[in-house]
Amino acid sequence: MELSITHRDKIYLTGFMGTGKTIVGKLLSQKLNYRFIDTDDLIEKETGMTIEEIFNIHSEEYFREQEKKVLHSTFNLKKAVISTGGGLVTYKDNIELIKNNGIAVTLTASPDIIFSRISKDANIRPLLQGDKREEKLNLLIQKRVYYYISAHFVIDTSILNAQQIVDKICQEAGL
């Protein structure tokens, strides 16, 4: 896919939790000498609350509004790799906004791999708390797949290491 030069200065990593957005984003930003930004970190900084606290005190809708504000704040950045929260692309027109303001890369992995990766994390993600976590994960993936495949390109991270993913992004994006 031919991308304009202006698109090349921002790379948005989208995808489900546990697909490698943060690890890959940090490595990619180092390789390109770009700034690394994690939208969840920005939300926590702006609100003074953790993501879990936001969900518990306010609501998912409130969180999605905060995501949209943070997303808009990235549009004027230059030379940035932005790792988005897993659900950011599903809210309103966020995926189209991302595609119009940078290169949209979705990282995917098989549900089994995702579940294995996030099960190692001490923090249980708000949308997966409670019983039947694997079923909740599969349902969320099914709900979000349309948005994820709408990116400029999609990379399956199931059997690739972080460096291989970075190299693939650079190749696909012509960087």
Image (cartoon, helix red, strand yellow):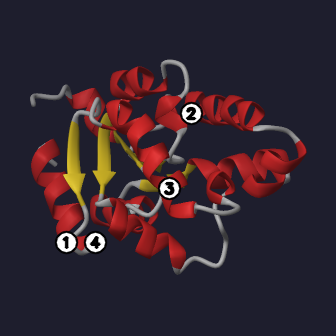
Residue 103 location, x and y as percent? 29, 36
In this rendered view, identify the residue nearer to me: 76 or 40. Answer: 40
Side of 169 relative to 114 (left or right): left
Q: Of circles 1 and 2, which is in front?
A: 1
Residue 52 location, x and y as percent? 76, 56
Q: Amino acid at mark 2?
A: Leu
The answer to whether the residue labelled 2 contacts the one labelled 3, judged by CB atoms less than 8 Å apart, is no
Q: Earlier in the sequence, mark 1 or mark 3?
A: 3
Q: Of circles 4 and 3, which is in front?
A: 3
Does residue 157 lie above or below 120 as drawn?
above
Q: Amino acid at mark 3?
A: Glu
Residue 71 location, x and y as percent? 56, 33
- What separation in Å lies between label 1 and label 2 (alpha carbons)? 30 Å
Residue 107 location, x and y as percent? 31, 52
Q: Which residue is mark 3?
A: 135
Q: Which residue is mark 4?
A: 162
Q: Earlier in the sequence, mark 1 or mark 2?
A: 2
Q: Earlier in the sequence, mark 4 or mark 3?
A: 3
Q: Earlier in the sequence, mark 2 or mark 3?
A: 2
Q: Secondary structure at mark 2?
A: helix
The answer to whether the residue labelled 1 contacts the one labelled 3, judged by CB atoms less than 8 Å apart, is no
Q: Which residue is mark 2?
A: 71
x 35%, y 37%: residue? 145
Q: Residues within 10 Å of mark 4 (few under 14, many from 20)?
A: some
Q: Residues within 10 Å of mark 3 (few under 14, many from 20)?
A: few
Q: Of circles 1 and 3, which is in front?
A: 3
> Can residue 24 be seen at all in this image of the molecule?
no
x 62%, y 29%: residue? 68
x 41%, y 29%: residue? 98
Q: Which residue is mark 1?
A: 159
Q: Secondary structure at mark 3?
A: helix
